[in-house]
Image (cartoon, rainbow, N blue to C red):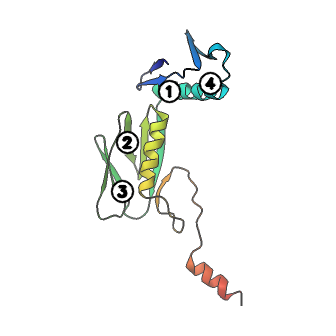
Amino acid sequence: MGIIYVEGPVGKMELPVPSEMEVKISGNTIEIAEKNGVTARNIQGLFRSLLQNAVTGVKTQWNKTLELVGVGYRAQTSGTELELNLGFSHPIKMKAPMGITFKVVENKIIVSGADKYMVGEVSAIIRKLKPPEPYKGKGIRYDKEFIRKKLGKAAKAVGATGAK
């Protein structure tokens, strides 16, 4: 099992090559083939996608944007640390993992990095701190995420009295 090193203007990544795959690099082309006629098409497709994501990531960073929705919800960065005020009695501080950067613009948190998996993972961890609730939609949500809202008690009470 070998390792492919991918390096670009944004960063460096290394990707382990599965034992069933054979990689040939010629010029600007990378060819992935099955070793010894082993049928491992699913692994070949996965590895191709991972390699493409790595090349894209070191060339232009992967980004995920999170929105803070709610009164008093704030985020700010200081160096590699993200500080979140989410209505708890204390602020939440998060250190950025290696290769990940945070940027805060108008109540939006932008998580960036070369590794697509890590960007998604860190974004999911941040969102999990205060997921959007279904009644008012307050919380941390992904950019352009649609939150299906529930009606609540008042609408149920009106519906129940009208059914008599």
Camera-side mark, 4 or 1: 4
- Can you say whether 6 is above or below 57 in the image? above
Query: Can you identify the residue that label 3 sits on?
Result: 74
Q: Quadrant of residue 23?
A: top right
Residue at left 57%, top 59%? 147
Taking the image as shown, residue 111 lies to the left or right of residue 51, namely left
Upstream in sequence: badge 1 or badge 3? 1
Q: Amino acid at mark 4?
A: Gln
Q: Callout 3: 10 Å neighbours few (<14), some, many (20+)?
A: some
Mark 2 vs 3: CB contact within 8 A = no
Q: Amino acid at mark 1?
A: Ala
Q: Amino acid at mark 3?
A: Arg
Mark 1 vs 2: CB contact within 8 A = no
Q: Callout 4: 10 Å neighbours few (<14), some, many (20+)?
A: some
Camera-side mark, 2 or 4: 4
Query: Can you identify the residue that label 4 sits on?
Result: 44
Residue at left 30%, top 65%? 89
Upstream in sequence: badge 3 or badge 4? 4
Q: Position of residue 156 (x, y in %)?
A: 62, 80
Upstream in sequence: badge 4 or badge 1? 4
In depth, the one of 35 and 128 nearer the eye is 35
Upstream in sequence: badge 1 or badge 2? 1
Query: Can you identify the residue that label 1 sits on?
Result: 54
Q: Helix, strand or loop at disc 4?
A: helix
Q: Helix, strand or loop at disc 2?
A: strand
